[in-house]
Image (spheres, helix red, strand yellow):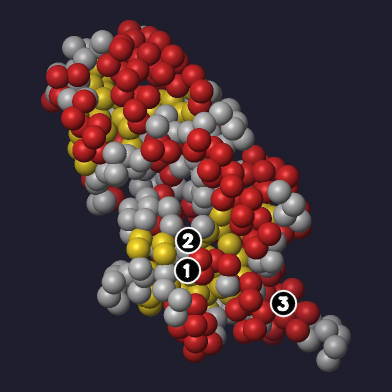
């Protein structure tokens, strides 16, 4: 049987069911929102399915929400009835493709079965953090998560990963190579533009260092704060902490304004986040585990100097443009040397970061990544249609 792609598939009229989360705020929520917006602008119909207390509708995204028992930063606990309700919802929606941001909830394990019953291809994007260096508890914990998920995600039609390092980890756990596609996290570089720092003059300091992320155990913020206090540079530099989390109150008690630390809390407004980045010089992450953090790509797009640990996909990104990479087990020692060094040699910032924006435009552009995602959708759907009608 000969297939005419255009007759079989009208790609732009494709109906996509996207399963993700709206809260709590993190890179996963931002990624889903940005990609869905872009897909809708390009003519796709996207229904966003997530867990929320009450039905919610924002922007131009069609949304359906499902009740949950407990929602945490990394995982959502659902009731025993949720899979059945979700299956019926999918049956009514009848999407062409099901796309989920993993790992989300126990519902993740039901999707391959639902996919087979409803004859819908299912694609997963694996956001979960990892580390290839098993030198801390967080790295082992996330490795066990990957090991648990590896058998189930092998049943998905396709799994999107952010880097060759993440792909290598899944291959070592037995996921077939043909199931994996590298499609990195991405950023809208038209929004995240370089700017001049006015905040530095306002707070009367030589340099502002920025931590941008969740204040949780896997982010290892304690090591960053300890290195900062040991460095004794509060008179000449400031450390701005943007984010919130379970460890926020505890750490704020020990690390105060007298140490040159400014706690700003969570900033959910995109315009404010961009404005903060434009006023920074150096962005720091001390994470034990990572996926591919949007904060890194956003900082690079603003042409900032990035100091990140080699957790997750960080090494693959930073090695391509010359940012500063530190080992997860040497975070304190490295940072207490780097803080005074960078403060005294501000010309070094520009040397390190001058290529960063060009790398983002070339490799981590939201527009290029969405086009690649479109190609994946059409490829998966065409293959699905071919298998469905191969005996006709």
Q: Are marks 2 and 3 in contact (CB under 8 Å)?
A: no
Q: Nearer the viewer, mark 1 or mark 2?
A: 2
Q: Are marks 1 and 2 in contact (CB under 8 Å)?
A: yes
Q: Which residue is mark 3?
A: 384
In this view of the protein, can residue 346 be seen by the observer? no
Q: For the residues marked 2 and 3, what is the alpha-carbon distance in whole angstroms?
A: 25 Å
Q: How many marks?
A: 3
Q: Which residue is mark 1?
A: 19
Q: Which mark sits nearer the N-terminus, 2 or 3?
A: 2
Q: Nearer the viewer, mark 2 or mark 3?
A: 2
Q: Which mark sits nearer the N-terminus, 1 or 2?
A: 1
Residue drawn where x is 27% and y is 16% of the image: 229
In the figure, is residue 252 to the left or right of 77?
left
In the figure, is residue 315 to the left or right of 305?
right
In the figure, is residue 118 to the left or right of 358?
right
Q: Which mark sits nearer the N-terminus, 1 or 3?
A: 1
Q: Quadrant of the N terminus?
A: bottom right
Q: Nearer the viewer, mark 1 or mark 3?
A: 1
Q: For the residues marked 1 and 3, what is the alpha-carbon distance in whole angstroms?
A: 20 Å
Q: Which residue is mark 2?
A: 104
Mark 3: secondary structure:
helix
In the figure, is residue 285 to the left or right of 119?
left
Instruction: Work out whether residue 40 or residue 174 is closer to the camera in this orientation and state it.
Output: 174
């Amino acid at each position: 049987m000969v297939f005419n792609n255009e007759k079989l598939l009208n790609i732009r009229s494709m109906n996509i069911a996207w399963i993700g989360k709206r809260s709590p705020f993190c890179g996963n929520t931002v990624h889903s929102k940005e990609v869905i917006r872009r897909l809708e602008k390009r003519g796709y119909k996207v229904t966003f399915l997530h867990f929320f207390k009450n039905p919610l509708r924002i922007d131009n995204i069609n949304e359906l929400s499902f009740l949950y028992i407990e929602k945490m930063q990394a995982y959502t606990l659902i009731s025993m009835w949720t899979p059945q309700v979700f299956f019926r919802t999918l049956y009514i929606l009848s999407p062409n493709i099901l796309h989920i941001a993993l790992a989300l909830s126990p519902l993740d394990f039901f999707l391959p079965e639902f996919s087979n019953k409803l004859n819908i291809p299912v694609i997963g994007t694996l956001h979960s953090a990892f580390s290839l260096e098993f030198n801390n508890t967080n790295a082992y914990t996330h490795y066990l998560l990957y090991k648990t998920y590896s058998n189930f995600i092998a049943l998905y039609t396709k799994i999107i990963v952010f880097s060759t390092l993440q792909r290598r980890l899944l291959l070592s756990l037995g996921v077939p190579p043909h199931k994996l596609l590298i499609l990195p996290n991405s950023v809208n570089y038209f929004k995240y533009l370089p700017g001049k720092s006015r905040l530095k003059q306002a707070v009367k300091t030589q340099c502002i260092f920025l931590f941008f992320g969740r204040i949780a155990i896997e982010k290892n913020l304690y090591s960053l704060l300890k290195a900062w206090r040991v460095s004794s540079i509060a008179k000449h530099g400031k450390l701005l902490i943007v984010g919130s989390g379970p460890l926020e109150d505890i750490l704020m008690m020990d690390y105060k304004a007298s140490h040159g630390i400014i706690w700003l809390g969570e900033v959910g407004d995109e315009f404010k986040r961009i404005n903060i980045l434009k006023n920074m010089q150096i962005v720091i992450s001390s994470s034990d585990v990572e996926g591919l953090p949007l904060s890194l790509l956003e900082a690079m797009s603003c042409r900032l100097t990035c100091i990140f640990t080699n957790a997750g996909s960080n090494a693959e990104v930073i090695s391509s443009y010359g940012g500063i990479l530190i080992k997860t087990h040497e975070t304190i020692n490295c940072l207490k040397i780097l803080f005074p060094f960078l403060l005294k040699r501000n010309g070094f910032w520009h040397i390190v970061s001058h290529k960063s924006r060009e790398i983002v435009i070339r490799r981590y552009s939201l527009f290029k990544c969405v086009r690649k995602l479109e190609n994946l959708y059409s490829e998966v759907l065409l293959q699905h249609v071919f298998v469905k009608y191969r005996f006709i």
